[in-house]
């Protein structure tokens, strides 16, 4: 998504439509597509991030992170739901890159939701990596670090490291989280 496309989406009210699509949870494929578009907007520029925050994307993305995959879920839907979660985590990471948004992201319950991903979706390397990178992005912010300390399950982070021993991005992000947690204690 280029800056012209994102500007057009923002100007036409498309952000609200995407957020409503995520909130309604119509289908797994639609959730995946909508969160991918929101990620594109969050990745593109600060103006888009501001619009996402104003229109309520943090809450919608946090609820997308909290989606659960049931044993009866179809295989294609499982893939779409996992992709939805990854898109939502990455979008929240982009949104929290703007310092004034960090407290809003933390207050949305996203830290707990993402720690839950690390606990339950351990086999998915890309989702685990995105989740750990989200936690890493919060470490530079005092209030977010306090929330992380209160809710961090060190065993969950270690389990993620052990499950993906060859994932350098995950390990680097986890080490930064551990270093910041130790500094704070």
Image (cartoon, rainbow, N blue to C red):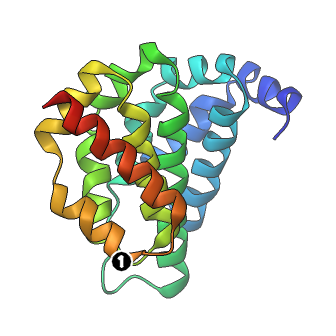
In the image, residue 172 sits, relative to residue 17, either above or below, namely below
Q: Is residue 97 left or right of residue 184?
A: right
Snapshot quadrant of residue 17: top right
Q: Quadrant of the N terminus?
A: top right
Asked whether the viewer can see residue 121, the reply is: no
Q: Position of residue 85 (x, y in %)?
A: 46, 58
Q: What element carries label 1?
A: helix
Q: Which residue is drawn at 26% across and 53% down?
A: 115
Q: Mark 1 points at which residue?
A: 163
Can residue 174 be seen by looking at this rendering? yes
Residue at position x 48%, y 71% from top? 125
> Is 104 situated left or right of 109 in this image?
right
Percent position of residue 122, x then y: 34, 73
Counting from the top left corner in percent of width and height, residue 45 is at 71, 24
Residue 54's place in the image compared with 106, above or below, is: above
Q: Quadrant of the C terminus?
A: top left
Q: Is residue 164 left or right of residue 122?
A: right
Q: Considering only vertical position in the picture, is 37 above or below 12?
A: below
Q: Residue 182, percent across and down? A: 20, 38
Q: Which residue is drawn at 49% across and 22% down?
A: 53
């Amino acid at each position: 998504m280029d800056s012209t496309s994102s500007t057009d989406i923002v100007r036409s009210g498309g952000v609200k439509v995407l957020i409503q699509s995520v909130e309604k949870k119509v289908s797994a494929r639609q959730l995946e597509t909508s969160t991918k578009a929101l990620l594109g907007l969050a990745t593109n520029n600060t103006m888009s991030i501001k619009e996402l925050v104003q229109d309520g994307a943090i809450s919608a993305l946090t609820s997308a992170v909290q989606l659960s995959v049931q044993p009866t879920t179809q295989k294609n839907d499982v893939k779409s739901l996992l992709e939805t979660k990854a898109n939502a985590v990455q979008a929240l990471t982009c949104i929290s890159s703007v310092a004034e948004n960090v407290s809003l992201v933390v207050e949305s319950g996203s830290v707990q939701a993402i720690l839950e991903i690390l606990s339950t979706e351990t086999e998915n390397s890309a989702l685990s990596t995105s989740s750990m990178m989200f936690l890493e992005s919060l470490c530079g912010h005092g209030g977010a670090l306090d929330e992380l300390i209160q809710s961090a399950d060190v065993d969950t982070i270690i389990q993620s490291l052990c499950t993906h021993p060859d994932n350098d991005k995950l390990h680097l992000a986890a080490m930064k989280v551990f270093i910041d947690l130790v500094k704070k204690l």
